[in-house]
Image (tube, helix red, strand yellow):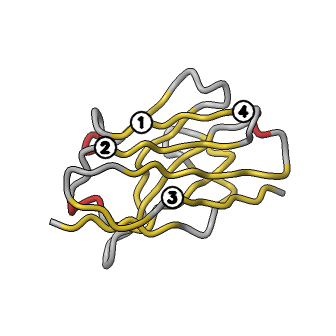
C-alpha cells in the first residue's frame, strides 16, 4: 500500500509560480513511476507530467512543456512539480499518483489532491 500527500497548492496570479510536493510512504518509492494529473471544473482528469523511478526521464503534455518540470528525490520519498508562467487555464485540482504503468499512465495509487487557482 502507498499513501500520497500533496502540498503546495494555492492562489497565484497569471505568470506566477508554484511548486507542488507529493510525499509518499509505503512501498519502495524508487521502484515505480510517478505522475501528476489535474482536473478542472467540468472536465475530466488529465495527465500532466510523469517521471520514471530513476528520475532520468520526464514526460509532459504539450500545454505545459517548457513551463512545468517534474522531479523526484528518492531519498526523501518525494516528487515535485515546479510550475512556472502559470496561466488561468492551469486552474485545477492537482493529483499525485504512484505506480504508473503504460503509455496511458495508468496509476494504482492516488493522493487527495491540492487546489491550484491562477487568477488573470
- In the image, residue 47 sits, relative to residue 118, either above or below, namely above
Where does the image place residue 117, in percent across and percent down from the top left? Answer: 32, 68
Residue at image location 44% in from the left, 69% down from the top? 115
User: Spatial distance from mark 2 to mark 4, Cα to Cα?
Assistant: 23 Å
Side of 99 where 10 appears, left or right: left
| Residue pointed to by mark 4 | 74
| Residue pointed to by mark 1 | 69
Marking on residue 84: 2
Marks 1, 3: nearer the viewer: 3
User: Spatial distance from mark 2 to mark 1, Cα to Cα?
Assistant: 9 Å
- Number of other residues with Cα within 10 Å of mark 2, as a class: few under 14, some 14 to 19, many 20 or more: some
Work out whether mark 4 precedes mark 1 in sequence or the reverse, and give the earlier one.
1
Work out whether mark 2 precedes mark 1 in sequence or the reverse, and give the earlier one.
1
Q: Are marks 2 and 1 in contact (CB under 8 Å)?
A: yes
Marks 4, 3: nearer the viewer: 3
- In the image, residue 86 sits, relative to residue 61, either above or below, namely below
Residue at image location 50% in from the left, 52% down from the top? 20
Where does the image place residue 39, in percent across and percent down from the top left? Answer: 40, 67
Question: Which residue in the rendered view is the most extreme toward the left?
Answer: 120
Q: Are marks 4 and 3 in contact (CB under 8 Å)?
A: no
Amino acid at each position: 500500500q502507498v499513501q500520497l500527500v500533496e502540498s503546495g497548492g494555492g492562489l497565484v496570479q497569471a505568470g506566477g509560480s508554484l511548486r507542488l510536493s507529493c510525499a509518499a510512504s509505503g512501498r519502495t518509492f524508487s521502484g515505480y513511476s510517478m505522475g501528476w494529473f489535474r482536473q478542472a471544473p467540468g472536465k475530466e482528469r488529465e495527465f500532466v507530467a510523469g517521471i520514471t523511478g530513476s528520475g532520468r526521464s520526464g514526460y509532459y503534455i504539450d500545454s505545459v512543456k517548457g513551463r512545468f518540470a517534474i522531479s523526484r528525490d528518492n531519498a526523501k520519498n518525494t516528487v515535485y512539480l515546479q510550475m512556472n508562467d502559470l496561466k488561468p487555464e492551469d486552474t485545477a485540482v492537482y493529483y499525485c499518483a504512484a505506480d504508473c504503468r503504460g503509455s496511458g499512465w495508468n496509476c494504482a495509487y492516488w493522493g487527495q489532491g491540492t487546489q491550484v487557482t491562477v487568477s488573470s
